Amino acid sequence: MNVDEAVGRALASEGVRTVFGVVGSGNFHVTNALVAGGARYVAARHEGGAATMADAYARMSGEVGVVTVHQGPGLTNMITGLAEAAKSRTPLLVLAGEVTSPLSNFWVDQAALAQAVGALSVRITSAETAVAEAVAAYRLALRERRAVLLNLPLDVQGHEAGDLAAQVIPLGAPEGTPLVPADLGSFERLAEVLAAAERPVFVAGRGARRARRELELLGDRVGALLATSAVARGLFKGNPWDLDVSGGFATPLAAELIRDADLIVGWGCALNMWTMRHGALIAPSATVVQVDFDAAALGAHRSVSFGVVGEVAGCATAVTEMIPAQRGGYRSDELAARIAAGRRWQDVAYDDESGGGRIDPRTLTIRLDELLPPERIVSVDSGNFMGYPAMFLDVPDEHGFCFTQSFQSIGLGLATAIGAALARPDRLPVAALGDGGALMGIAELETVVRLGLPMVVVVYDDEGYGAEVHHFHGAPHDTVTFPPVDLASIGRGFGCAAVTVRAPADLDAVREWLDGPRDLPLLIHAKVTRERGSWWLEEAFRGH
């Protein structure tokens, strides 16, 4: 068989089950070979959407996300999605056709493009080595949790492939094997500070999403309170010591308790300005420790007392065994009662500002939380609105929240929801978008309908780029505000059921949809109040 077919079939045999993309001449045969090898192909309407779908699918499934695109513009169209995946350390493999002559209209330095946004770039160099190089790229994405571009030169794709069996070696050590040998000395040091701490708090990030049990056991041993970064939201759901999210989305109680900690341990968590509110959640006298499998991540965003290199679950287990006696730590019956009463944003009183044909986004989201089934998967776009679904829509666990926000681009939310929905078809997919991001990614609404996804798409419409409107006080806003758009009619045009919501009573239509066959996606066009910015916005913009 030719190289393009051999590469596709080899990747399918490695375990690729789902592939996202937009097909052109340069990736036509490799995509068909993946399908012939057993992979499902999901056609997006734009390469940027395809990349984000693959990113979200990888986050929610634990598999490598795979996206296939045409050479040149196919790759440039997906660069924002590739940048998001690279910054998030998502295991992602991009298959891109490549021309090698600068005289071609399709020519662009594809390797340089990938490297510019933090992805790794490799290339098929010959027919004899093609399969081995493709499999190596896949395993690189898998083992190092990296976004990898695999360039497929057109002048090599059509050649007859070499001996396939001779090119591929067994996969070897399974995923999750620590990349760096454990440092026993740093484990012992972490055990010492945990044993001495009176008010320890664990903040778990993306790198800890598979280590709930191990972190809970260690937390029980030392009396730690448990929190997560935004991307790991839901990890400790149901635990009585769960504070939910640390950072800009933290409840007042969570912020108070984290700020009073004498020890903060970040587990697979960057402890960046968002998670630590620019350091405001760290007491001046607190000890800060960071645990990560990547040594380069330690102290990258803020100074730490010391770092521990290792895989989170293994580190937590080793440290637990080094602390023989259970300690009360931060935990008490009184504090348990406070957490039970104030863990959720729904427990925090507010003045409902609904009226004048617009609904308070807090009221909207709380009502949706009550209406929608608990087994849901929530995907959130970026913008002024984003705190409302991130804080007021509960999720069942760490597989119930997908947050493609490392690059802070708007317009990724709908594609994120598609990828997440395909990874977890057992849950109701919910896409939370602003009007700006919804219109930027609206082409993928056709994909939602075509795939038959029973998705709820909530558009928080303030008729502008709300973050800029509320950040630049006193300046003219003509460049960031827009006339009204009938998003419900647009949704119906794509084939969705749709409702416009201006008051809580309008949400009765959501219950009717939930009680029905759910054979069409539901678009909720919410005309939200817009007199003020989100309360977390001012804090967030301190980093700009």
Image (cartoon, rainbow, N blue to C red):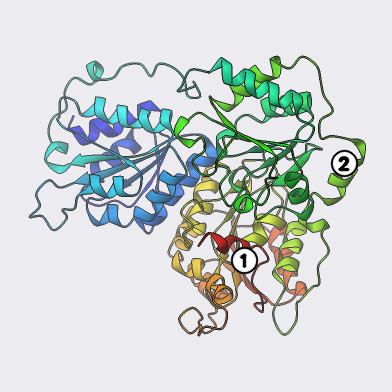
> Residue 241, percent across and down?
79, 38
> Residue 155, percent across and down?
11, 40
Label 1: element kind? helix
Quadrant location of residue 90? top left
> Residue 23, percent across and down?
29, 51
Q: Give the residue at x 71% y 26%.
A: 194
Residue 462's mark? none
Q: Amino acid at mark 1?
A: Glu
Q: Give the residue at x 75% y 61%.
A: 366
Side (left or right) of 400 relative to 127:
right
Q: Give the residue at x 46% y 66%.
A: 442
Quadrant location of residue 335? top right
Circle 2 is placed at which residue position? 335
Q: Quick one: 190 or 4, which is closer to the camera?
A: 190
Side (left or right) of 504 relative to 270:
right
Name, please, the residue furthest toward the front: 285
Circle 1 is placed at which residue position? 538
* CA separation in Å, label 1 and label 2: 30 Å
| Residue 43 visible somewhere in the drawing | no
Side (left or right) of 153 relative to 18:
left
Q: Give the residue at x 36% y 58%.
A: 46
Side (left or right) of 90 relative to 11:
right
Q: Amino acid at mark 2?
A: Leu
| Residue 502 visible somewhere in the drawing | yes
Label 2: few (<14), some or many (≥20) within 10 Å? few
